[in-house]
């Protein structure tokens, strides 16, 4: 069985890495031949994620669209085309419409609430070319929709009855637990993300300021984004895929603040799950999938108010044994629920079922003709 994955970015980007790239080796071992084609290649990724540079971005998108159109000519040699977030992010879903017309089954996967408009930090001009309606349009065109949580599944079911929930996987062979925590040492509270999401640290700015005032041995380390505020001891560190595991191991506590709004309900707890896998006790906002991901007090902490954030962080700062206990339970939970050998079979089943249903329907149509 041959499967073509159409993704928007190379493996450096979290969405295609977690939803596709890291699962491809498992799928190929299970008998699927997988080809992955990003719209933007590795050499252009840094430019694509930077602010401005619209002329260069326009050229990249034009080249990417040309590649997508050439892909249509080869699509029939595949048993299924798997589209992550959209074959092309701007304008109407022309590529998906042409794929549907070519009589190849399609799976549409979206792992974020992209049906809710959010202003882009690095693509503000191109935002005007995006339509939130295209998510429902592609979902209706697809033979199946695959999403990582029930919130997104409920939205997808408005357009397509064939919806399968496949949670995000974690590479537990790569992201291994850090060494046990010790009392008395400096405490690093870490946040990992990008320039577009660092703004959410302002949501708990008062809590972080109180923590830094209360505990002189605490530093906030911001990895992959920029955030600085008076009264909060902060280190800014560039995120590097090659150093990602060590960057997690250098943290004592991980945080994932989110705004209390509808968009947050579509998130799939990537940061929290990474902390859990790396043996770093996490604290996240009590909203959406975080409520399913974290067993409050056992595999991590959930907070809403500034007071709750202060309370949860203080408990972890003051008690190394508590950090170790939560880290151990969280790591085991990730191994049991999110390891690649757990999620891989779920994605394989969705792919094979979609192809089987498509072939059955085609044979039925031929018999009736």
Image (cartoon, helix red, strand yellow):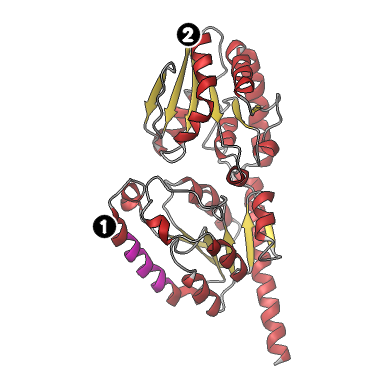
Determine whether 174 is above or below 44 in the image.
above
Residue located beneath label 2 in the image: 216
User: Residue 304 vs residue 367: left or right?
Assistant: left
Please provide percent x and percent y for residue 196.
Answer: 43, 41
For numbered disc 2, what is the local secondary structure? loop
Q: Which residues are magenta?
A: 60-71
28 w.r.t. 242: above or below: below
* Callout 1: SS: helix
* Residue 114 disc label: none
Question: Are dots 2 and 1 in contact, CB under 8 Å?
Answer: no
Q: Does residue 202 belong to the magenta stretch?
A: no
Separation of disc 2 and disc 1 at Cα? Answer: 47 Å
Q: Is residue 69 magenta?
A: yes
From the viewer's perspective, is 113 left or right of 350?
Answer: left
The C terminus is located in which quarter?
bottom right
The foreground one among 45 and 234 is 234
Name the residue located 64 percent from the left edge and 52 percent from the top edge: 152
Q: Quadrant of residue 198?
A: top left
Q: Is residue 298 left or right of residue 114?
A: right
Report which residue position mark 1 lands on.
55
């Amino acid at each position: 069985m041959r499967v073509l994955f159409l993704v928007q970015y190379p493996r450096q980007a979290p969405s295609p890495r977690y939803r596709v790239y890291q699962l491809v080796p498992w799928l190929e071992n299970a008998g699927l031949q997988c080809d992955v084609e990003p719209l933007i290649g590795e050499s252009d990724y840094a430019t694509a994620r930077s602010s401005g540079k619209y002329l260069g971005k326009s050229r990249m998108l034009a080249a990417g669209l040309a590649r997508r159109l050439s892909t249509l000519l080869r699509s029939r040699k595949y048993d299924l085309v798997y589209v992550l977030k959209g074959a092309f992010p701007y304008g109407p879903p022309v590529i998906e419409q042409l794929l549907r017309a070519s009589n190849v089954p399609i799976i549409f996967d979206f792992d974020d609430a992209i049906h809710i408009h959010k202003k882009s930090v690095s693509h503000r001009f191109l935002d005007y070319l995006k339509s939130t309606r295209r998510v429902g349009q592609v979902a209706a065109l697809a033979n199946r929709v695959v999403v990582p949580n029930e919130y997104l599944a409920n939205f997808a079911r408005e357009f397509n009855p064939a919806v399968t929930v496949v949670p995000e996987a974690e590479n537990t062979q790569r992201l291994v637990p850090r060494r046990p925590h010790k009392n008395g040492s400096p405490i690093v509270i870490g946040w990992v993300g990008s320039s577009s999401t660092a703004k959410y640290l302002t949501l708990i700015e008062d809590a972080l300021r109180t923590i830094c005032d209360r505990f002189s041995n605490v530093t906030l380390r911001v990895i992959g984004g920029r955030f600085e505020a008076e009264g909060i001891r902060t280190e800014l560190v560039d995120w590097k895929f090659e150093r990602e595991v060590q960057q997690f191991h250098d943290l004592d506590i991980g945080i994932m603040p989110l705004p209390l709004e509808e968009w947050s309900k579509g998130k799939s707890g990537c940061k929290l799950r990474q902390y859990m896998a790396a043996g770093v006790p996490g604290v996240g906002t009590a909203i959406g999938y975080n409520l399913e991901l974290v067993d409050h007090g056992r595999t991590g902490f959930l907070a809403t108010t500034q007071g709750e954030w202060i309370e949860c962080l203080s408990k972890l700062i003051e008690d190394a044994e508590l950090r170790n206990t939560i880290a151990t339970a969280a790591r085991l939970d990730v191994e049991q629920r999110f390891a690649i050998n757990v999620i891989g079979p779920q994605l394989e089943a969705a792919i094979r079922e979609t192809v089987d249903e498509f072939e059955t329907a085609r044979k039925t149509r031929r018999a009736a003709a």
